[in-house]
Image: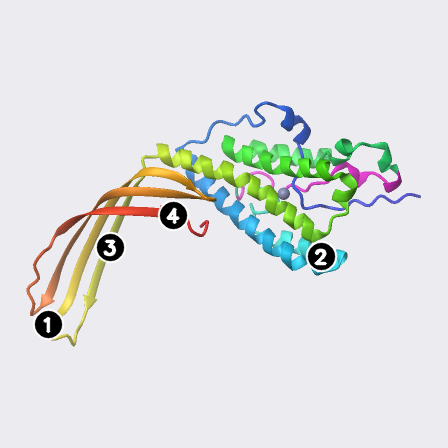
Amino acid sequence: MKRIVIRMRHRAAAAAIIGLALAPSPVRADACKCRHLEAVGVALHNTIYLREAYRRKSNDLRPLDASSARTELDRFVQSLPEGMAPAPSPGPGLGPRRIPYMPVGDSIAPDQLSNFTDDQLCQASPASMQILGQALQAAPCDALGQSIVTHEQYHWAFCRRIGYRAYHAMHASEDAQEEVEAYAADIPILRDELVRLLRIANLRVVVTVRSNSAFPTNPLYSTIHLNNDGEVKANNVVPAGDLVKIEADGTQATTGSIEGSCEYEGMPITIPANAVLRRTDGA
Ligand SMILES: [Zn+2]
């Protein structure tokens, strides 16, 4: 009796892949709008986080034997927060939590594999394609769906490129490295969409700082009150590597008073403010 071993893989559904890959515009959701700014930002953050997490995990797994590495990768995937594994998700609470990729080849007995082409063996199972469809349905807007499709297409293309047997035999550290590359393919889509949305968002940043410093033992003054109100308006939003750089100009006004034995002059003051906001940690 033949025993068919089905192994859950961490690759997202190479999915829809065939149908989606051939369609000129695979995702039909509406274009992202200002109200999707946060969702796109969160997706970019998650994608960068996952790329780096998988990169570290791939390195950790490399010295382990195949079985231990597989167990550890499974544990790692299970430990990822909702919306972060194993494919980009539309977000917490939106769509399926994860998309298990089971290539059709995983459900075919090893001695029957030679009856199929790599294209056939690398196709996602109907079940995983259905879950991918749910994820796309839940994607709030076009770019978020596009990033999911791009990720899946990477897995699908990779399986076809190296052939199903080599793909199936990969060490778990190679699986994790494949995820690094799949997430890396998503990042420009999400980053460029964030830039586009920020450009049309007419972004304005208001900074208000109130500070009171008391110096009870100081002979000249006892308390300093300072109010700092700044307002800058984004005038340029550009991609910067994986991230987004926002250049902004405006003014800041400082008013204050000093209590004590000193007289203070020069308040209030208004000076030009120039700010560059750069997401340095993906947060
Ligand atoms: Zn993946």
Under circle 1, the secondary element is: loop
* C-alpha distance separating marks 4 and 2: 37 Å
* C-alpha distance separating marks 1 and 4: 40 Å
Look at the image and give the residue range highlighted in magenta. Answer: 92-111
Residue 220: assigned label: 1
Residue 118, position as x, y percentages in the image: 77, 34
The disc, 3 or 1, on the residue closer to the chain's N-terminal end is 3
Quadrant position of residue 136: top right
Q: Residues within 10 Å of mark 2 (few under 14, many from 20)?
A: many
The disc, 2 or 3, on the residue closer to the chain's N-terminal end is 2
Is the residue under label 4 in contact with that under label 3 (CB below 8 Å)?
no
Q: Which residue is mark 4?
A: 278
Of tags 2 and 3, which is closer to the observer?
2
* C-alpha distance separating marks 2 and 3: 51 Å
At 63% from the left edge and 37% from the top edge, which residue is drawn? 154
Q: Which residue is mark 3?
A: 209
Three-letter amino acid code at disc 3? Answer: Val
Drawn side of residue 219 relative to residue 114, left or right: left
Label 2 CB sits under 8 Å from any ligand 1 atom: no
Three-letter amino acid code at disc 4? Answer: Arg
At 24% from the left edge and 55% from the top edge, which residue is drawn? 209
* 72 in the magenta segment: no
Residue 69: assigned label: 2
Under circle 3, the secondary element is: strand
Against 62, residue 165 (above or below) is above
The disc, 2 or 1, on the residue closer to the chain's N-terminal end is 2
Three-letter amino acid code at disc 1? Answer: Leu
The disc, 4 or 2, on the residue closer to the chain's N-terminal end is 2
